[in-house]
Image (spheres, coloured by chain):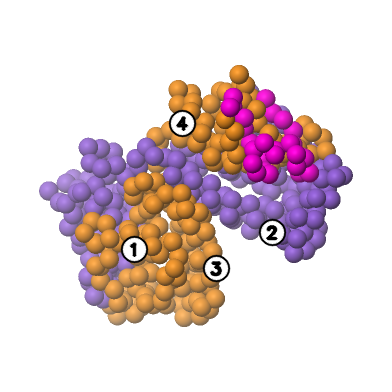
Chain colours: A orange, B purple
Amino acid sequence: MAITLYELAGANSDLRFSPYCWRVRLALAHKDLPTETVAWHFTDTDALRFTGQGKVPVIVDGDTVVHDSFAIATYLETHYDDHPSLFPSANMAHARLINAWVDSTIHPLLARLILSDIVGVLRPQDQVYFRETREKFFGRKLEEVTANRDETVHEFRRALQPVRIALKAESWLGGDQPDYADYILAGSLMWARCVSRFEVLEEADVVSEWFARVRGLFGGMAEDAPRP
Amino acid sequence: MAITLYELAGANSDLRFSPYCWRVRLALAHKDLPTETVAWHFTDTDALRFTGQGKVPVIVDGDTVVHDSFAIATYLETHYDDHPSLFPSANMAHARLINAWVDSTIHPLLARLILSDIVGVLRPQDQVYFRETREKFFGRKLEEVTANRDETVHEFRRALQPVRIALKAESWLGGDQPDYADYILAGSLMWARCVSRFEVLEEADVVSEWFARVRGLFGGMAEDAPRP
């Protein structure tokens, strides 16, 4: 029996454009599951009443109703485990994307919080080298890069929002146990911790709690590392 | 025999602060591999000459020299495959983080490119609903949200930099085959494609080439989907 997918539609009911519905449509195709789609429009309130909530995508698979694209993906993965996997074990590719995200998004923001503090922990000859190369790269004095850090820190914390969302579902970025994804981001936060006393995270943040857990791993290796 | 790890150090040589070195230190601990660390400072140029390049982290494992934190992580994973995995198969957790990154970073930028075009594909009654709810959410008219899209598009393309980096290493975000990570981002780009003729990607971008490959999957399902 085909799975029914309720999809957001335009005035032309064949026009389907929701990113979340597209994720599910691609996932159903990937798992080679027969699918019938139903056009749903923003004001078709009654049509979703049976789902107990008001948003698409929704799938109906026999007696099972599932909403939320990620919940649907995980349902399909576990329920149809003899079909092609949506999450094959080549987990390294995903970690590579997370690595690239941290390097290209989180690091530039962290630099604007701690760059000028790095000089303070270096040997004199390294201070000269560091200041010269980094000031050339940033096109201004190190102290100017971090001058507005009391404001920049809010932007930095906002940029960690994906991590907060992921940690709502699981204790570690690796899932129920730490893996390299945890070490990628923890490495960045250790960078800040080991050169600066500037508080890049708020204490009440779930990211702070997670970072404390990572520091506690391996006998407190990171927790006990020297700080300035 | 212990693995030797060259780590960036401060004037206090016990102070180790490089994010990339921390990633490797945590990875070595995770894999329970005996490690000796060597302090390296920015101007210790000669000390790394044997590695054929000039940056830490570097590990020396018997006759093997590996640099670059991700290359080291993958070396450790494959060479010490009987030790705890850095990339266990619970790949879903990583996909969840990628999902959260796309939702919280890519979608707000995409909205500033295509939001006002969505109205044009809706039924009249849905147009009223959409305009009312979205204008309340954004605190301004839809047309104002997208007014500067010729500039915003550059910010959007920059935000995809992690994807570009990941696609340098592999053909798909899932690695050597597409998986749900590919569908997460492709879903977002289908959203834009199915409501707007505004070009969110440059043709010469590797992200464009990858997106065309995703659209070609499953008999061209996404390629052939209706557009306005």
Q: Residue at x 45, y 22 (%)?
A: A82
Instruction: Name the chain letter of the residue that bears numbered label 2.
Output: B
How many tags in the picture?
4
Q: In terms of depth relative to the viewer, which is nearer, B6 or B23?
A: B23
Instruction: Name the chain letter of the residue that bears numbered label 3.
Output: A
Q: Residue furthest toward the right?
A: B124
C-alpha distance separating marks 4 and 1: 32 Å
Instruction: Kindly check if marks 2 and 1 are in contact, taking CB atoms under 8 A apart as contact.
Output: no
Q: Residue at x 24, y 75 (%)?
A: B12
Q: Is residue A21 in view?
A: no
* Amino acid type, mark 4: Thr
Q: Are marks 4 and 3 on the same chain?
A: yes
Mark 2 or 4, closer to the camera: 4
Instruction: Name the chain letter of the residue that bears numbered label 4.
Output: A
The boundaries of the magenta stretch are A36-63
The residue to which callout 3 is attached is A155
* Marking on residue A212: 1
Residue B3, image x and y in percent? 18, 51
The residue to which callout 4 is attached is A78
The residue to which callout 2 is attached is B152
Name the side, left or right, on which B123 lies relative to B29.
Answer: right
Instruction: Kindly check if marks 4 and 3 are in contact, taking CB atoms under 8 A apart as contact.
Output: no
Label 2 sits on a secondary structure element that is helix
Q: What crowding class fits label 1: few (fewer than 14 Cα within 10 Å), some (14-19), or many (20 or more)?
A: some
Label 1 sits on a secondary structure element that is helix
Q: Are marks 2 and 3 on the same chain?
A: no
Task: Quadrant for residue A93, please give it.
Answer: top left
